[in-house]
Amino acid sequence: MRHTPPLTPQFYVTAPQPCPYLNGPVERKLFTALQGDDAEQLNNALSRQGFRRSQNVLYRPSCADCAACLSARIRVADFVPTRGQKRVRRRTDDLERTATSPWATDEQFQLFRRYLDSRHADGGMADMDIFEFAAMIEETPVKTRVIEYRLRADGTDAPRPLTAVSLTDVLDDGLSMVYSFFDPAREADSLGTYLILDHVEIARRARLPYVYLGYWVPGSRKMGYKANFGALEIYKGGVWQPIGDIAAHSGATHPLNIDPIAEQVARIELPHTAESPAD
């Protein structure tokens, strides 16, 4: 007889620290290591339960007094771009993509620094050096691609500068946009929106049902743009559901309504290991 025992990763909680999205709340994260031969299975399973990857860690917000962070994904088959999003596609028609292995380059880092200095100079990544950047790109135990966007070739030897980059995981049910950055000089072209639109197209061609966008945070200007995409689902109450009325979502939560960490961990559905002989 053969059986498939579930994976048994250990889960931990970070120390409380100021929330990077909302003024006032204190954040903490539930996390586990992502490593070994079963990393791909674990990443797939936990991504479907609102977790995100950062290098070799999977994490999910688990704050004591707030439940604002909601994992978001687009249903590719039902997505229809708005008129504004169609205009974004036209403004960025001069770009073309190339998917590469997760290998950091100096050109990527220089673009990353310009992006941070322009848009997130006071953020948690503001002091990241080239070695930390390389770790962000390269330390991945799962199927990951670096998707680069440059000006289209025009038949001349003119340089084609790097314009945007997305670090993207390939899940069994979609694409997960781990981190993206772009040339701040083209901010008016809405390159952040363009990257999401292009990932929807990549997923459609690959017949993958979802594009995972990370966390949508009602009340946060940094994350509000994600609600502009149609066919958006959020992970709330342990299930994926259409976002519906944006105004109906709030981060305000009474502490007594937050389940203890042990109960949260107990409800996580873990994948099973490869079949092994029973004793």
Image (spheres, rainbow, N blue to C red):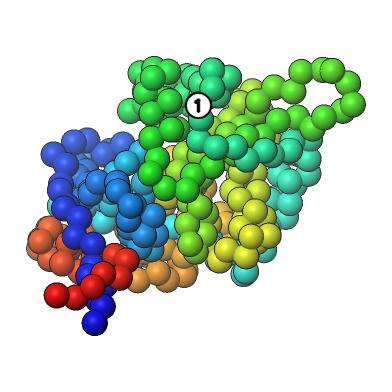
Q: Nearer the viewer, residue 219 or 82?
A: 82
In the image, 77 versus 116, the foreground residue is 77
Q: Quadrant of the N terminus?
A: bottom left
Q: Position of residue 45 (x, y in %)?
A: 35, 63
- 153 is higher (above) or lower (below) than 73: above
- Of residues 39 and 195, the one drawn nearer to the viewer in this rendering: 39
Asked if residue 237 is positioned above or below residue 216 in the image, the reply reads below
Count of numbered badges drawn on the protein? 1
Residue 144: percent from left, percent from top: 49, 44
- Residue at left offset 14%, top offset 75%: 279
Residue 221 screen position, x and y as percent: 44, 41
In the image, is 171 to the left or to the right of 88?
A: left
Q: Residue at x 61, y 43 (%)?
A: 195
| Residue 121 vertical placement versus 13 (above, below) | above
Kindly state the secondary structure of the residue where label 1 is placed.
loop
Residue 213 relative to residue 197: left or right: left
Q: Callout 1 environment at 10 Å: few (<14), some (14 to 19), or many (20+)?
A: some
Instruction: Name the residue at 59% across, 25% down.
Output: 184
Q: Is residue 78 left or right of residue 176?
A: right
Specify whether residue 188 is in view: no
Residue 277 in view of the camera: yes
Amino acid on which the number 1 mark rests in the picture: Ala
Side of 51 relative to 164 (left or right): left
Residue 14: x and y in percent read 16, 42
Q: Residue at x 89, y 26 (%)?
A: 155
Residue sitting at the far right: 155
The residue tagged 1 is: 104
* Quadrant of the image occupied by residue 16: top left
